[in-house]
Image: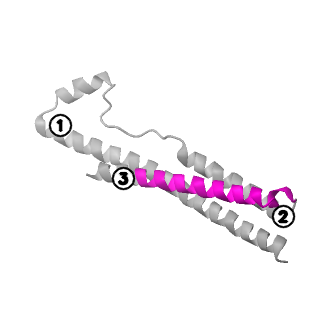
Amino acid sequence: MVLQEQREQSHLLTTKLNILFVANGALLTSLTISRLMMIPSPFTVAEVIGFFISFTLLVRAFLPRQVAVSPNLEDRKFLERYLALSAVEYQLQMMVNWSETYNANKQRVDDVSKTLRLAAYATLSVATIMLIHILAAYVF
């Protein structure tokens, strides 16, 4: 049940990742179409740095992380150790394994969540800088 919730959180984070990639792509396209990227200014430098930070964070969140699986079935000692346990000891060991698996996977999900939050702030910053840049270029 708890591991299922972690799986759902992971899917939700993947959806957020996709939305942020699309939003960044749309902002970059808008900036390119408006040709403001070609005009050297402090705004352009800030936008380029913002896009670099945002896309770097998104790629970092996108990179696969090792998901914890317990017990490790590739370990030959697994069979020797677990087959020697009584039923109660086995159940206790499985509870410990589930707890360790949950904690390891929670750390992974929290890391991706934090990275996506930072990427969202970077995207918002780029959008704000773009808005100010457009206002400065076309209104003033």
Q: Secondary structure at mark 1?
A: helix
Q: Is residue 82 above or below residue 7?
A: above
Q: Give how far apart the Cα atoms at labels 3 and 1 are.
A: 28 Å
The outermost residue toward the front is 33
Q: Residues within 10 Å of mark 1 (few under 14, many from 20)?
A: some
Q: Nearer the viewer, mark 3 or mark 1?
A: 3
What's the colour scheme? one colour
The residue carrying mark 1 is 90
Q: Which of the marked residues, 2 or 1, is nearer the chain's N terminus?
A: 2
Residue at image point 23% right, 40% down: 94
Q: Give how far apart the Cα atoms at labels 2 and 1 are.
A: 64 Å
Q: Secondary structure at mark 3?
A: helix
Q: Give how far apart the Cα atoms at labels 2 and 3 are.
A: 42 Å
Q: Which of the marked residues, 2 or 3, is nearer the chain's N terminus?
A: 3
Q: Residues within 10 Å of mark 2 (few under 14, many from 20)?
A: few
Number of labels in the image equals: 3
Q: Is residue 93 left or right of residue 138?
A: left
Q: Is residue 110 left or right of residue 48?
A: left
Q: Point out residue 85 in the picture as x, y percentages from the top left corner.
A: 16, 31
Answer whether labels 3 and 1 touch (C-beta < 8 Å): no
Answer whether labels 2 and 1 touch (C-beta < 8 Å): no
Q: Point out residue 99 in the picture as x, y percentages from the top left corner.
A: 30, 47
**Amino acid type of the residue tagged 3 in the rendering:** Glu
**Amino acid type of the residue tagged 1 in the rendering:** Tyr
Q: Quadrant of the C terminus?
A: bottom right
The residue carrying mark 3 is 8
- Say if the magenta span includes residue 22: yes
Report the predominant secondary structure element of the magenta stretch: helix
The residue carrying mark 2 is 42
Chain part drawn in magenta: 11-39
Q: Is residue 76 left or right of residue 130?
A: left
Residue at image point 34% right, 37% down: 69
